[in-house]
Amino acid sequence: MLTEMLGDKMEIVYSQIGPTSSSSNEKSVFQNENTATLKIHLKDNLLKESEYIISSIEELMGTIPDAEISIIRDETALQSTLGTDEAPLVIEVKGKDLDILDQISSEIKAKLQEIPELLNIKTNIEEGAPEIDVIIDRYKAGIYNMSIDEIITQLKDLLMGKDAGKYEKDGEMNDITVKMPDMSLSEFNSITLKNGNKNVPLYEVAHIEKSVSPKQLFRRNQNRIGKVMADVDRSIAFDQVITKVREQLTTLDIPQEYNIEIVGEEQKRQEAMSSLSFALILSIILVYMVMASQFESLIHPFTILLTIPLAGVGAIWAFLLLGKTLSIMAYIGIIMLAGIAVNDSIILVDAINQFKAQGLSLKDSIIRAGENRIRPIIMTSLTTILALLPLTFGIGESAALRSPMAIAVIAGLITSTLLTLVVIPCVYYVFEKIKVKLFS
C-alpha cells in the first residue's frame, strides 16, 4: 500500500515484526509478537512535503480494520534535546473517575479533529487491552467468612501460578509453578475457592465484568490524568495552532472537579520564553552597568542601549518578510544582539567623547567621529554578518534550528549598523543639549 501511494518518493523502507530490542524505549512494554514497525526514509528533496505525506499515510492506514496504528516522526538528536519526547501537542485532563476521563478525552479528540493543522490524534485511554474485572461482594464474602485479601490471594495463585519447588534438569535447577490451564470466561466464573474445608464457587462471592484498560495510566497528586496527543503541521506557526486549540477547548462543558491543561511543547515554549525574557532584561542591565562604569556617565549608556531596539526591529522585519516564524532560537539570536549590536554605538560614542576632550565643539565632535569611525563600524558588523551567513543557507538536518538564530543576528546587525550612523549621533546631540540646559 505504501509503495503504491509514495512510489519513488521513498528511498528506504525498513520493517520489523515483533517488539523492539531497545530497553530504553518506554513504549516497548506495550509491544508483543503482534506488533510491527515500518520505517520510511524519504528522499532529501521531499522533506518539506513530510507533513502532507504523513497526513496521506494517516488517511490510508485508517482504512485498515482492527489495527492500532501510530505515526511517529523521527527527529535529530538536537531536536530531541530542545523539544519533548512526547507528541508536540499534549492536552492533559485531570480527574478521578476513569470513565469521565475517557469521555472528556474523546470529546477533546473530536474537537481537535476539526483543526486541519493537527494529525495523528490519539489518547492514552482509547483502544486499550481488554480485561476482566472481578468485583467482590463484601457482604456475600462476609457470609462465607472470607476476607478480601484471602480471595485475591487465591485468585492470583490460580491464575498466575504458585511456586511449588524446584527440579533439576541437565545440571540446572528449574522452578515448578502450579497454575490452572487456560479456560473460558464461564469456566472462570465457576472456579472454586477454598474456605477451610469447604469449596466456594467464585460466582457466590463476586461477579465478573468486561472492560478495557487504558494504554497508559498517569497519576499526579493522587489524580488520574488522561492525555490527548497530536502531531502538528510544522508549516504553520505553533502558537497559531495553539490558539485554534484553545478556541475549540472553550466550547467543551467540563465538570467542576476536572480541568484541562495544554502541556507538551507549548508548556516548554512558555517556560523557555519566560526564562529568555528574564535573560534579555538581565543582559541589558549588565551591558548598562559596564558602559556606565567605563564612560563614567549615566546618560550616554542610554544612548548606546537605543541600538538594541533598532536591532530588534530589523530582526522582526526579517522574519516577517521571509515568512518564517519567530521561534525560540530566533529569540536567542535577539538576546545575542543585546551584546553584539551595541559595539558599533560604543565605538561611535567613545570617539565623540575623545574629540570633545580635545576641545572640539559638540557638533564638530559628532561629525569628526562619524567620519573617522564609519570604516571600523562597517568592518566590525560585516565580519560578524559574513561569519554567520553560512548558517542561514539551511545545510544539514538541524538547519531549521540554526538558521533562525543566524537570521535574527544578521538582520539585527544590518539595521543597527545603518541606523547607528544616523540615530545615535542625533540622540547624543539631544541628550547633551538637555544636560547643558539642566546643569548650566
Image (spheres, helix red, strand yellow):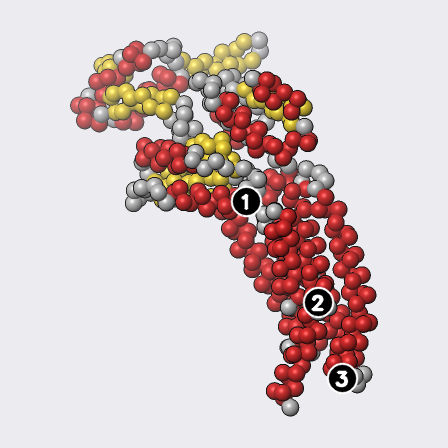
Q: Which residue is mark 3?
A: 361
- Counting the numbered discs, the total is 3
Image height check: is 190 above or below 309? above
Q: Judge from the rendering whether residue 142 lies leftward or rightward of residue 408; answer left or right.
A: left
Q: Nearer the viewer, residue 372 or 24?
A: 372
**First-in-chain label (1 vs 2):** 1
- The x, y position of residue 320, in whole percent, is 60, 51
- Give the residue type that dot 1 points to: Ala
Q: CA distance from mark 2 to mark 3?
A: 21 Å
Q: Judge from the rendering whether residue 51 lies leftward or rightward of residue 339; answer left or right.
A: left
Q: Are marks 2 and 3 in contact (CB under 8 Å)?
A: no
**First-in-chain label (3 vs 1):** 1
As drawn, the residue found furthest toward the top would be 170
Q: Which residue is mark 1?
A: 237
Q: Residue at x 62, y 63 (%)?
A: 309
Circle number at residue 326: none
Q: Nearer the viewer, residue 167 or 186?
A: 186
Q: Residue at x 78, y 57 (%)?
A: 382
**First-in-chain label (2 vs 3):** 3
Give the image quarter of residue 338: bottom right
Image height check: is 159 above or below 315? above
Q: Give SS at disc 3.
A: loop
**Badge 3: how crowded within 10 Å, few (<14), some, or many (20+)?**
few
Give the image quarter of residue 147: top left
Q: Which residue is mark 2?
A: 420
Q: Nearer the viewer, residue 235 or 297?
A: 235
- Give the residue type that dot 2 points to: Thr
